[in-house]
Amino acid sequence: MTENAANARRGILIILSSPSGAGKSTLAKRLMKWDPTMQFSVSATTRAPRDGEEHGREYYFHSRESFQAMVDNNEMLEHAQVFDNFYGSPKAPVVEALQAGHDVLFDIDWQGGQQVRNSIRAEDVVSIFVLPPSIAELERRLYGRKQDSEEVIKGRMERSKDEISHWAEYDYVLVNTDVDRAEEEIRAIVMAERLRRSRQTGLMDHVRNLNAEFEERE
Ligand code: ADP
Ligand code: 5GP
């Protein structure tokens, strides 16, 4: 995606939340593939890596002590306890990406969503909540992912009611029944949000150039 004066714009913070297993990591990965200029906010966490997860790609894996040190040093944009672990979004990469006019995608829970909305200009944040088609399907997806023990899955299922209760705090809500359809819906949201007049900082210059062209023709 090339940036020129006409399509220069402010970066957007896109928050994706859902109960665990509804598909937000899958959708986030697809979105990053669709637009590689988008930056994924790699969270720090105290939970253990799952098979196939890499430090610095899915998460920065930390001990409780080093996680707490990051919080104490004010290095987190937001942080929260989710299940039995701590999760947080490092601030510096987000600030850098926004300054460069890039969008940043967050896969965070409702607590993180609230904190981001309260710490960043509200106009720069777009939030999307992903619902599962049913609770039975949510459970099937958690088991089907084959990444967590039965005990962990039970804990996630118990917490999903609480996560879902925050759906109405989000700008957009979609039901992830068919993953291709859900991806298309998120792309549509991102495309429309990028075209908001208030975000397109280069429009004044572009229209000025169009007017100059009119004058040249007169
Ligand atoms: P979350 O990040 O919300 O915890 P994941 O993206 O890890 O959820 O998805 C949980 C499981 O469900 C994964 O195995 C994923 O491949 C699968 N999944 C995601 N979306 C769908 C869908 N629309 N239909 C069927 N399975 C899905
Ligand atoms: P998981 O352990 O399945 O990767 O993530 C568990 C939950 O923690 C998900 O709801 C996910 O969105 C949330 N989460 C991941 N990173 C962060 C973060 O940096 N901050 C907050 N508040 N939640 C996060």
Image: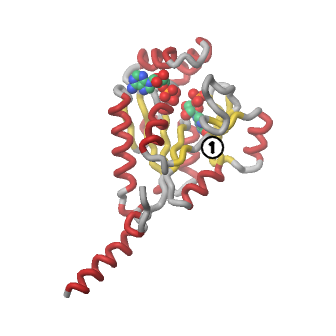
Q: Residue at x 42, y 61 (%)?
A: 199
Q: Residue at x 43, y 33 (%)?
A: 130
Quarter of the image for the C terminus: give it: bottom left
Q: Position of residue 105 (x, y in %)?
A: 51, 45
Residue furthest front in the image: 2
> Does 108 appear above or below 125?
above
Q: Residue at x 45, y 20 (%)?
A: 138
Please state the quadrant of the image where ligand 2 appears. Answer: top right
Would you identify the image quadrant in which residue 202 lies?
Answer: bottom left
Q: Position of residue 109 (x, y in %)?
A: 55, 35
> Does 29 appear above or below 146?
below
Three-letter amino acid code at disc 1?
Ser
Most foreground residue, 68 or 141: 141
Would you identify the image quadrant in which residue 52 lies?
Answer: top right
For the rendered model, the colour scheme is secondary structure
Q: Is residue 91 left or right of residue 33?
A: right
Q: Position of residue 91 (x, y in %)?
A: 64, 50
Most foreground residue, 143 or 36: 36
Residue furthest left in the image: 218
Does residue 161 appear in this view? no
Residue furthest top in the image: 150
Q: Secondary structure at mark 1?
A: strand
Q: Position of residue 102 (x, y in %)?
A: 51, 55
> Does 92 appear above or below 143?
below
Q: Is residue 66 left or right of residue 207?
A: right
Kindly identify which residue carries mark 1: 89
